[in-house]
Image (tube, rainbow, N blue to C red):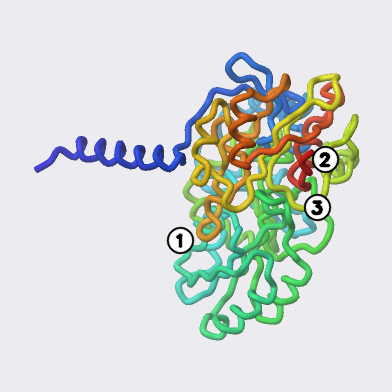
């Protein structure tokens, strides 16, 4: 009989070798984030374009003070499930505010956005039901759908005709139906056609869950879905997830969403930080349109189109016209296709699309160790040479980030998700 520890070690080493051979192995690199979209790594100051802190609120003094005050008063942790230790008043206040912000009757806060989507779908549909998910839905939406035991069908990205065709084919044989999509898709920055999708869902008595992780505080105007899910960790700069819906639906999820019932509640500091950030977001509306519409503080990059395939780099502090690298990162532009680019010096590695099926691996250069970080003093020559040789990097004119401006850097970061920078 073989030793189980040895077989486990052999299995792990073999899988790691396979990941290395495909240039798909992920590694963690020590990085310190700070205000103004700055980051420190290996003794160098960088500008991060991989961060989801769209409005720069994670380092906002008022948000930090709220988190510090809550920790001092209530302690560091929640102590257990909210159904066991009791419902903390900060969480009740946060849920009330989120529901009001979304125009819903009630809300429920989860430990993270992933946990929210892992629990919502299985609490609402089961083996006799149907789930239809956009092909580019986030991995956690797919995970929740599969855990539910419902029949899971993928429709083409933002394709209403394909969604109607699949509803026509599959809906009659199922008791309930749930459509999964995102308001703003994280990898491309495009948006779901929600008004038309909700009208189509009504025709087939299908419910709709919208993941608004990347829309809250940035792209919010318009139609609301019956189920509005999101996170506290992006534009609000804190941590956690939530869903807003009717009171009856929230009460049902409180009893049936296993990722809520059987997990520890959100720490007081995270709840207080999110509340403070929501106060700022609502009281200072000029922050909200900034990522999508605000002009850069200096000479802009040449921008064309409406879909982003990678984050642009950044210029020097106080300078203008600095060169930066822009990963085009369209379908097929990945480490699997261009391992030499990945191995050349300090190349920004791509992130697989966070989806659960087709399109996997067709990602922009973001996430993972070293992703989305631009050297302020210019890109290293091995990266420039190799990146251009394989066609996965193009040189662009990037605007100087006026880092003394309150949130110019985070504005530029968010803008890069909604536009494509044309190469010079």
Q: Can residue 119 be seen in this view?
A: yes
Q: Earlier in the sequence, mark 3 or mark 2?
A: 2
User: Local crowd at mark 2 within 10 Å, few (<14), some, or many (≥20)?
Assistant: many
- As drawn, the label of residue 24 is none
Tell me where residue 243 sits by quadrant: bottom right
Q: Which of marks 2 and 1 is nearer the N terminus?
A: 1
Q: How far apart are marks 2 and 1 (CA)?
A: 35 Å
Nearer the observer: mark 3 or 2; the answer is 3
Residues 393 and 50: in front is: 393
Residue receiving disc 1: 147
Q: Is residue 68 visible?
A: no
Q: Distance between the residues labelled 3 and 1?
A: 38 Å
- Residue 291: horizontal and vertical position, in percent? 82, 41
Which residue is drawn at the image coordinates 87% and 35% (left, top)? 300
Q: In the rendered image of this protein, does residue 304 appear above or below residue 226?
A: above
User: Local crowd at mark 3 within 10 Å, few (<14), some, or many (≥20)?
Assistant: few
Element at label 2: helix
Q: Earlier in the sequence, mark 3 or mark 1?
A: 1
Q: Which residue lies furthest to the left in this view?
A: 1
Q: Quadrant of the N terminus?
A: top left
Residue receiving disc 2: 281
Which residue is drawn at the image coordinates 64% and 16% (left, top)? 44
- Residue 168: horizontal and vertical position, in percent? 61, 84
* 352 sits left or right of 231 in the view: left
């Amino acid at each position: 009989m073989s030793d189980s520890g040895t077989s486990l070690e052999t299995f792990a080493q073999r899988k790691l070798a396979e990941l290395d051979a495909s240039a798909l192995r992920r590694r963690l690199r020590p990085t310190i984030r700070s205000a103004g979209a700055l980051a420190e790594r290996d003794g160098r100051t960088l500008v991060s374009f991989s961060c989801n802190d769209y409005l720069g609120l994670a380092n906002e003094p008022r948000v930090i003070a709220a988190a510090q005050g809550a920790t001092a008063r209530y302690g560091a942790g929640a102590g257990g499930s909210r159904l066991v230790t009791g419902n903390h008043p900060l969480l009740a206040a946060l849920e009330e505010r989120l529901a009001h912000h979304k125009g819903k009757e009630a809300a429920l806060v989860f430990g993270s956005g992933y946990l929210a989507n892992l629990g919502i779908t299985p609490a609402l549909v089961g083996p006799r039901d149907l789930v239809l998910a956009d092909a580019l839905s986030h991995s956690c939406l797919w995970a929740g759908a599969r855990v539910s035991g419902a029949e899971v069908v993928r429709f083409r990205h933002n394709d209403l005709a394909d969604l109607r065709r699949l509803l026509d084919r599959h809906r009659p044989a199922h008791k309930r139906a749930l459509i999964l999509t995102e308001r703003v898709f994280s990898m491309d920055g495009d948006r779901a056609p929600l008004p038309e999708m909700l009208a189509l869902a009504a025709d087939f008595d299908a419910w709709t869950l919208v993941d608004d992780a990347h829309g809250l505080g940035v792209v919010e105007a318009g139609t609301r879905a019956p189920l509005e899910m999101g996170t506290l960790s992006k534009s609000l700069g804190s941590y956690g997830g939530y869903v807003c819906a009717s009171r009856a639906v929230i009460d049902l999820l409180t009893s049936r969403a296993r990722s809520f019932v059987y997990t520890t509640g959100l720490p007081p500091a995270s709840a207080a930080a999110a509340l403070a950030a929501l106060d700022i977001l609502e009281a200072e509306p000029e922050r909200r349109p900034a990522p999508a519409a605000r002009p850069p503080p200096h000479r802009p990059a040449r921008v064309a189109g409406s879909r982003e395939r990678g984050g642009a780099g950044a210029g020097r502090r106080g300078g203008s016209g600095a060169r930066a690298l822009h990963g085009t990162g369209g379908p097929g532009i990945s480490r699997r296709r261009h391992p030499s680019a990945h191995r050349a010096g300090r190349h920004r590695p791509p992130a697989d699309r966070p989806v659960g099926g087709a399109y996997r691996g067709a990602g922009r250069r973001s996430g993972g160790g070293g992703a989305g970080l631009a050297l302020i003093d210019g890109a290293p020559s091995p990266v420039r040479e190799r990146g251009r040789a394989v066609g996965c990097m193009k040189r662009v004119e990037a605007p100087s980030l006026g880092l003394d401006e309150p949130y110019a850097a985070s504005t530029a970061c968010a803008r890069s998700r909604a536009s494509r920078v044309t190469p010079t």
